[in-house]
Image (cartoon, rainbow, N blue to C red):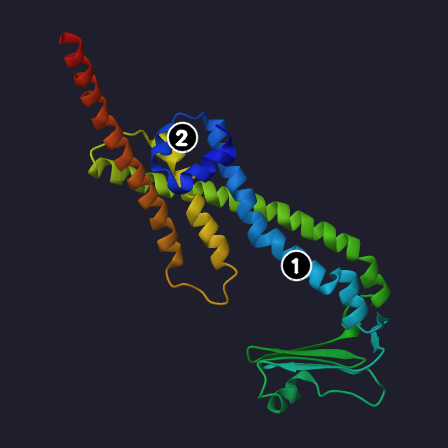
Amino acid sequence: MNVFKELMLSLYDFKSYKEFIKNKRRKVFLAGVVLMVLYFSLTMIVPFLKFQFKTGGFVKIIEDYVPDFKLSGGTLWVEKPVEYEKDGTYIYINTSPDTSFYDADEIGEYLTDYYQVVLMDSEKIIVKNKGEITGRYFSDFDVDFSREKLQQWVPSAYLIVTAFMILAFLFMTALFFFGVLVVALIGMIAASCMKYSLSFGQLYQMGVYARTLPLLLKAIVSFLPFSIPMFGIINFGLSVLYIVLAIQKMKESDLEKPIEFVSEQSDYFR
């Protein structure tokens, strides 16, 4: 049976878990990786591709929203003033010769209505964040930067995003297998209470498949505009429930075998 069919069966066929524990470890590991690829694609890759199609990518964003600018020799020049105000955030950039903001220690009383503020003139930047106000002169930075250089960095930005995606996938996969470890430990308690003998390795293999539906639900919930209280506990609880139901099916299957044997023997002696 291939991995994809097993993952499908793990959603609704609790009898199939008895076959899952017979799988080789590398196949179970592959099932976990495939499951994580699906989860990662839904929660990370699809939103990124959606962002790309919606905005046109980093190049298009720079062309549409970033005005021409140049920072060189401690002086900032911006093609046109930039002003943004929303949800307690205020950003104002104006490098014209007749514009100069107050120094950081003098500006606080004028910006009490905003939680976050960024002000830039040709000489300095002033930032207010969570009530703390700081300011620095561009001459303090040894920077030579412009809109043209920012555009040249776009390919590097995609490489950084790709590297981040790979690292994120490895981290999330490691976290997944650690989560299965927790499910298997709770499964041991459940198996003991149900008086059914299973090794930790078998419970771990069951735990990988028992995470299929909860992980898909977790992916779906990530798209909701609101959070579900204690969803993490509910999510792992569902995995444990799958193991309990699978153990119950195993017990029922084991009880049926002696009955069939007795029936066959009685037919023989007739």
Q: Which residue is pictured at 26% across the width and 40% down the height?
A: 190
Three-letter residue code for mark 2: Phe
Q: Number of callouts in the render?
A: 2
Residue sitting nearer the eye, 259 or 25: 259
Query: Splitting the image into 4 quarters, where does residue 95 fall?
Result: bottom right
Residue ID for mark 2: 20
Q: Secondary structure at mark 2?
A: helix
Eyeballing the image, is 67 above or below 22? below
Q: Secondary structure at mark 1?
A: helix
Is residue 171 visible in the rendered image? The answer is no
Which of the labelled discs sits on residue 50, or is there none? Answer: 1
> Reading the chain from its start, which is encountered first: label 2 or label 1?
2
Q: Which residue is pictured at 81% across the width and 66% down the height?
A: 143
Eyeballing the image, is 190 above or below 91? above
How many neighbours does mark 2 have within 10 angstroms: few (below 14), some (14-19), or many (20 or more)?
Answer: many
Three-letter residue code for mark 1: Lys
Query: Splitting the image into 4 quarters, where does residue 102 fall?
Result: bottom right
Percent of width and height locating residue 168: 58, 48
Whole-Å distance between the Cαs marked 2 and 1? 36 Å
Eyeballing the image, is 92 above or below 169? below
Residue sitting nearer the eye, 139 or 130: 130
Percent of width and height locating residue 78: 83, 77
Residue sitting nearer the eye, 103 or 43: 43
Q: Which residue is pictured at 56% across the width and 51% down the height?
A: 42
Please give left or right for residue 196 compared with residue 128 in the image. left
Please give left or right for residue 82 compared with residue 206 in the image. right
